[in-house]
Amino acid sequence: MESLTLSDVEQKYYSDLFVYCDTDNTKKVASNGRVLDLFRAAQLPSEVVLQITELCGATRLGHFGRSQFYIALKLIAIAQSGLPLRVESLNSVKDLPLPRFVVGKNEAEARHAALYQDTDSQGLYPASGAAVIPRPPGRGHQNKKATPATTSLPVHEVIQPLAPSIEPQPEPTSPVVSPHQSPPTSPHSWRKHKRQHSGGNVERQPVVAATGATWTHFREPQTGTVTGDGMWVSHSPPLPGQESWVSFTADTPPSSTLPAMHPSSVQESTTIRTVASAATTNEIQRQSSGYDDPWKITDEQRQYYINQFKTIQPDLTGFIPGSAAKEFFTKSKLPILELSHIWELSDFDKDGALTLDEFCAAFHLVVARKNGYDLPEKLPESLMPKLIDLDDSAEVPEPAADVGYSASPVEVTPNKSPSMPSLNQAWPEMNPSNEDTAIVHPVPIRMTPSKIHMQEMELKRTGSDHNHPTSPLLTKPPDLPEEAKLPASMKFVAANTVGDGYSSSDSFTSDQEPISRQRSQSGTSPEALKVVAPPPPPPRPHPSHSRSSSLDMNRTFAATAAPGQPQPSTIAYPPAVPPRPLPTQTSAPHTGHRVEAEAVPGGGAVLTTTSPQQIPQQPNFADFSQFQAFAASEQPSSLPEVDKHSEAGQVDKASEGAGPLRTVKSDGQADERVSATVNSAKGSSGPLGPPPKPVRRRLKSEDELRPEDEQHGPQKSNVIAAVLATQPSIPRSVGKDKKAIQASIRRNKETNTVLARLNSELQQQLKDLLEERISLEVQLEQLRPFSHL
Amino acid sequence: MAVCIAVIAKENYPLYIRSVPTQNELKFHYTVHTSLDVVEEKISSVGKSMGDQRELYLGLLYPTEDYKVYGYVTNSKVKFVIVVDSSNTSLRDNEIRSMFRKLHNSFTDVMCNPFHNPGDHIQSKAFDGIVSGMMVQTG
């Protein structure tokens, strides 16, 4: 064999390879198996390998001595460079690139060589020293990097995805794929390529991308990794392979001097080692290359993350819930504490779920951590959701990260509020336009009955009344008193509330009920705006009562009664609400609510004006028989308005003017007057005061009331009949009703106040009476001292 | 600025406690422990209105000669206790409230972390950061 002159680089390289093949540590002979594997890894046709073997003399010798080995290596280099295999070329070929050996299955070596080829061979030599160096430093690097044992895992991961991409390699993948020799299907290779050209921009990408391959493979490589690491540390031979990774990924040519040879443990340890080495190489590369943003996610990585995201959440715009993310990231075998920190960094909006961006950031951080990167305290700018820049342009990471981070809080706050747990008291109003969380203002809904509402209710009620003329009305008393407990013959249900004020005079309600029913009937008469006769005021205390303001009123009434008819009507005002037109009034077709309204407010006027006419009619209030007759006679009469007015006035007066009227009646003068002025032939209504009067009179004597009650019965029915008669005329213009309703409301309120006052006065009188009784009883007992003995 | 900040779980064991290390930490731990009784008393007194929004901020639990202890309890019965120096008179009630609010928010973030199991010791760096910001800055 001719002498083989090797360059220093080659010398070193070959010696390394020989050492690698020297499994027996003979330092003399390389094991055939290893050598053959190495030759196979050279990716040369088998016949070429045979030729080389023959040429180098191994076949002759039967083994590979050092020289043969070296010759073989050189021939391999020649063959790989495409030169014909000639022994003469051993020394003649200048600038022969180092033989390339594929690591394990992959064309790592090929890539290696490609790397080598990429770089100027001239550059190689200056770097040969460095190339020589890288091995130990690479080893050292690798050792150092290997200590973060977790790095091996991601590298293994890196291998995985490459496996499918690199078909010719039956063995598990090797993370590093030569962009020149391997199909650039693997993103890693592409990245490597880029790295080579772009200056290490993607140093961690292959590892990263591979890491993302599948977590499921973690377990397998894990165990292997351990062994790999062990082997790694102990064996120098494995180093070349790893060093190849190192050199491979490194921009510097040194990588080329380290052929990756894993003839022996290709099956497992190779991959593992390559995994580890890939990780380390990435780091080395990172260190060697310019310090561009290490947190940048490249497109491949991002695509991989997106694919992983899809496996959990098909909707790319959706969220990954925290539990699913926890499971996913737990597979990475990172300590929970670190995962927790990663989560804190990546869950930008603190909503317990990961969006696509957040997920990519978290994934990237996991990969970085697995590669030995320390987790940052703050989320790097490139990982910010919304801020991830997919460009490969290197940027200043730190300041930009800070800037980005500081800018993010502005975005955080708006996002924080909606997604913050409910305990976030600091953001009560910060609801962005997110409709899901926007404060919805309750739309006010009218719950209180309005006039129209009341009218409708009234109409409904009156409508029902329509169908059931008399009996339902009579049967309704239980209901009506509830509503119109007052005597309040209010026009609408609203009036009932006023009536509640009257209910205080409970003692009178029983008697007032018929009256109130009458009133309510009138109130519920066809048109809701019907002016209902005001509830009969509480019965005024008997004039004989010793003290009571009502007595004064009685006196006044009596006094006023004396002056004449007009006065009672006027007097009737203060104590009672002015009489309202009877619903019967509206029954008249032409008596619109206007009429009623006019009648009501003009009740006073009516009273005054028609007082001569009405006052005499007042007794008719109590005299229901009169009323009935009157109504019966008046309805078809030709004096609808006036009579209706008068009727209404009668009813109203009966209810409200009862007090003074009662006193008047008690005096007897009113009775006379009333009877005198009765239009129709109505019986004397002496004992019959207005409906409320008997109720009031209950105070002084029931005897008087009883007959009155009896009379009230028929009178009530009369009134009811009258009311019913007016029902057909209920449908009237609502507009007029409104005003009438409002007017009646006012009147009713006035009635309310008056009656309330009366009530209080009566209560006071009651108390006085009770006190008197007690004092009398005491006296009685005192006078009967001996009875106790 | 607090001298000691503690987070106590519902079962009254500490989830997180940090005090200014210059002084006897055991004393603070003891103070926090005794303050739990006061907290229990305060939250039990409002038991009638369990459905209502109970006031989360408990205010000054009890003052010792050297320190004042403030309490805050969440709806899940997790208690925050802040011990401040009595000599620090510049601390107003509102400031204490804001401190509790920050603590609560940070605690919520920790709870949202799926990797954190409720009942575990709080090991969040963010939470540590917040607490550090509230502690007395000793030289």
Image (cartoon, coloured by chain):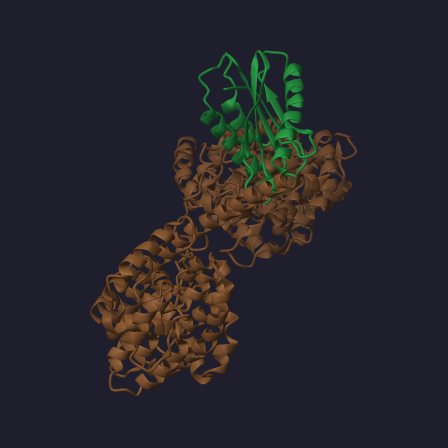
Chain colours: A brown, B green
| Residue at figure coordinates x 36%, y 71% from the top left | A455
Identify the residue shown where x is 31% and y is 84%: A634
How many numbered badges does the structure rendering display? 0
**Where on the picture, by quarter, is residue A443?**
bottom left
Instruction: Report the side of B38 relative to A479 (left or right).
Output: right
Where residue B62 sits, quadrant-wise, is: top right
The answer to whether residue A667 is visible is: yes
Q: Nearer the viewer, residue A651 or A498?
A: A651
Residue A683 position in % (x across, y down): 37, 79
- Comparing A344 with A421, the one in front is A421
In the image, residue A271 above or below residue A573: above
Q: Is residue A556 above or below residue A351?
A: below
Q: Please tell me which residue lies in front, A214 or A567.
A: A567
Q: Position of residue B2 (x, y in %)?
A: 53, 20
Q: Compare residues A234 and B70 and report the one nearer the observer.
A: B70
- Percent x, y of residue A8: 57, 29
Quadrant where the image shows the C terminus of chain A: top right
For the N terminus of chain A, the image quarter is top right
The percent position of residue A290, horizontal first and vertical second, equals 45, 32
Give above or below for A171 relative to B28.
below
Q: Residue furthest left?
A: A609
User: Residue at 43% across / 77% down in the picture?
Assistant: A715
- Tell me if A37 is positioned left or right of B139 in this view: right
* Residue A57 in sight from this viewpoint: no
Left/right of residue A577 with respect to residue A238 in the rendered view: left
